[in-house]
C-alpha cells in the first residue's frame, strides 16, 4: 500500500504578485488671496495659473468675502465656473482634461481677473 505523508498543507506556489500601486492624483491649489477685491489682476497671484491635464484644481477662498470664479471662454478648457466659494476656506475641486487658455474673473467682483492655462501633461 502506498501513501503520502504530511499535514495536508499545500506548498507555496511562488512569490505573491506585487500590489498594484494606487494612482496618485496631482492636485494644484489655487487661492483667492486675502483682500482679493482690492488686488484686481493680482487676486489669484501675480502669474497665470498653470495646470496640467489630468490634474485636479483645488480652488480655495482665503479671502473674507464670498467669490464665484468664472471662465471668460468656457469652451477653451473644461473649467466653466465654481460654485460660490464661501469666505475663509470655501473650496471646490475640478479635474482638468482639456488643454487651453482662458481668462477668469469673479462674477461677484468683475475687477478680479486672472488667466487659467491648461497644458498637456
Image (spheres, grey):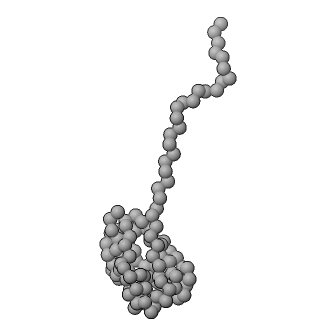
Q: To which quarter of the image does residue 86 belong?
A: bottom right
The location of residue 121, given as percent across then percent down, is 35, 63
Determine the residue positioned at 36% across, 79% down: 47
- The answer to whether residue 3 shows anywhere in this view is yes
Determine the residue positioned at 66% across, 24% down: 8
Q: Can you say whether 84 is above or below 6 in the image?
A: below
Q: Can you say whether 30 is above or below 87 in the image?
A: above
The location of residue 16, given as percent across then percent down, is 53, 37
The location of residue 113, given as percent across then percent down, is 38, 86
Determine the residue positioned at 32% across, 65% down: 120
Q: Residue reaching furthest top?
A: 1
Q: Residue reaching furthest front?
A: 46
The location of residue 24, given as percent across then percent down, is 47, 58
- Frontmost residue, 38 versus 19: 38
Q: Can you say whether 40 is above or below 90 in the image?
A: below
- Frontmost residue, 82 versus 43: 43
Marks counted in the figure total: 0
Determine the residue positioned at 50% across, 74% down: 92
Q: Could you tell whether 92 is left or right of 10 in the image?
A: left
- The answer to whether residue 66 shows anywhere in this view is no
Q: To which quarter of the image does residue 100 belong?
A: bottom left
* Quadrant into which the N terminus falls: top right
Q: To which quarter of the image does residue 56 belong?
A: bottom left
Amino acid at each position: 500500500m502506498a501513501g503520502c505523508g504530511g499535514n495536508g498543507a499545500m506548498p507555496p506556489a511562488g512569490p505573491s504578485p506585487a500590489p498594484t500601486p494606487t494612482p496618485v492624483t496631482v492636485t494644484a491649489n489655487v487661492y483667492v488671496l486675502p483682500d482679493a477685491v482690492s488686488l484686481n489682476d493680482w487676486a489669484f497671484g501675480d502669474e497665470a495659473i498653470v495646470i496640467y491635464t489630468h490634474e485636479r484644481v483645488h480652488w480655495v477662498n482665503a479671502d473674507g468675502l464670498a467669490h464665484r470664479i468664472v471662465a471668460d471662454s468656457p469652451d477653451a478648457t473644461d473649467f466653466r465656473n465654481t460654485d460660490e466659494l464661501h469666505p475663509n476656506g470655501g473650496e471646490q475641486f475640478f479635474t482638468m482634461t482639456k488643454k487651453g487658455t482662458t481668462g477668469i474673473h469673479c462674477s461677484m467682483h468683475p475687477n478680479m481677473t486672472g488667466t487659467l492655462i491648461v497644458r498637456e501633461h
